Image (spheres, rainbow, N blue to C red):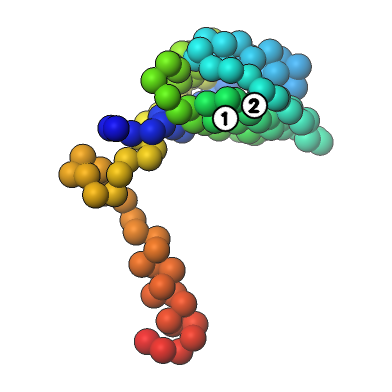
Amino acid sequence: MEHLGKHLIIEFWGCNDGINDADLMRTAMIEAVHAAHATLLDINVHTFSPHGVTGVAVLSESHLSVHSWPEYGYLAADVFTCGETTDPPAAVEVLRQYFQPSVVELQNIQRGIDPETSKRPKRRNWTQQIHEMESITAGTN
């Protein structure tokens, strides 16, 4: 096992007005899920007042979520999939085609890497951090 899942964190800047259209967002999300070869279980898209859309697609393989700030032309999204049959970058490409950002920033995180493996990237150990914080609040440091 190299890793259990792939998690893409997506930042789109300079998007078109479609990021404020809940129906278009739903359509784009469904198409993105299909492009990624994932299985859609449920989808919920909500419009905020005066503007902004958020959506979550629950997948057999995990999820796709989007959150828009039309006043900034910004769309934040993430695609998390497990297994070897999915293609998360294909979902990113669908969203890019729909919302036409001028800037695309991606972070690719491999999820479920055994902490004992030498291939694991350096990550902050929050378990240790929590214990340190608990001892400070308890006055035992």
Percent across and percent down for residue 21 are 74, 20
Seen from the viewer's position, the closer of residues 22 and 18 is 22
Residue at position x 51%, y 12% in the image? 37
- Tell me the crowding category of disc 2: few under 14, some 14 to 19, or many 20 or more residues within 10 angstroms, Cα based: many
Quadrant hosting residue 107: top left
The residue shown at (39%, 63%) is 127
- Residue appearing at x 49%, y 86% in the figure: 138
- Find the residue positioned furthest to the front: 1
In the image, 34: left or right of 52?
left
Q: Is residue 92 depicted above or below 74 in this figure? A: above
- Image coordinates for residue 76, horizontal then vertical, percent: 55, 32
At a point 41% along the width and 89% down the height, the residue shown is 140
> Where on the picture, by quarter, is residue 22?
top right
Residue 59 visible in this rendered orientation of the protein:
yes
Which numbered circle lies on residue 57?
2
Q: Residue furthest right?
A: 49
Residue type indicated by callout 2: Ala
Tell me the number on the disc at residue 63: 1
Q: Is residue 65 above or below residue 115?
A: above
Q: Position of residue 2 (x, y in %)?
A: 28, 32
Is residue 100 or residue 119 the one in the foreground? 119
Q: Do the residues bearing badges 2 and 1 touch, measured as CB atoms within 8 Å?
A: yes
Residue 9 percent location from the top left of the image = 46, 33
Towards the viewer: 131 or 54: 131
Q: Which of the image's four quarters has the N terminus?
A: top left
Does residue 59 appear left or right of residue 138 in this picture? right
